[in-house]
Amino acid sequence: MLESCQNAQERWGGVHLLIDRWLQERQELVHAYAAINSSPQAPSANAETLQKFCEILVDYVSAGHFEVYEQLTNEAKAFGDERGLELAKQIYPRIEVITEVALAFNDRCDNGDCHDSGSLIDELVRLGQLLHERFELEDCLIEVLHNAHQEQAAPAL
């Protein structure tokens, strides 16, 4: 029984820690976004704040695609969760579209095209709406692909 508990912790405890770190990074992203929007001056006038936001944005979306989603999918496969895997197939394409918008925004800022404050503000508003949608989709994935398996992974006492 103890070995079973240790195996489950080794196998899925890492996923939980990965998700926790990722959600912490999400909080940093939200705070960086708020810092840009709270500035009374045009976001492009505060290049350092915008650069910090872009760095966190790229780190966050990259962690999702290259770490978290893969681990969540692997966990669902290990538990034979066809419902969860089907949901992931439906949700991932929308997350990918939002990722492309986020990366395009970052590329635009990296190329120095963030000087037109009117269009930048519009883009930030749109990006904020898309990030909100993405967070909801990710929360759904975490709920279905991870939290649903915690009871199955927990050893019987």
Image: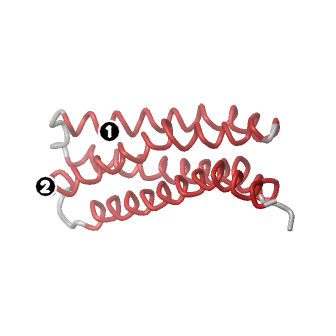
Return the residue at label 1: 105
What secondary structure is marked by label 1?
A: helix
Q: Is residue 153 left or right of residue 50?
A: right
Q: Residues within 10 Å of mark 1 (few under 14, many from 20)?
A: many
Amino acid tagged 1: Phe
Give the secondary structure at mark 2: helix
Quarter the N terminus occupies: bottom right
Q: Is residue 58 left or right of residue 155?
A: left
- The CA distance from mark 1 to mark 2 is 16 Å
Front-lying residue, 121 or 132: 132
Residue 117 point in image, percent of width and height: 20, 48
Q: Is residue 2 above or below residue 18?
A: below
In the picture, which quadrant includes the C terminus? bottom right
* Residue at which label 2 appears: 45
Colour scheme of the rendered structure: secondary structure
Which of 30 and 6 lies nearest the eye of the viewer? Answer: 6
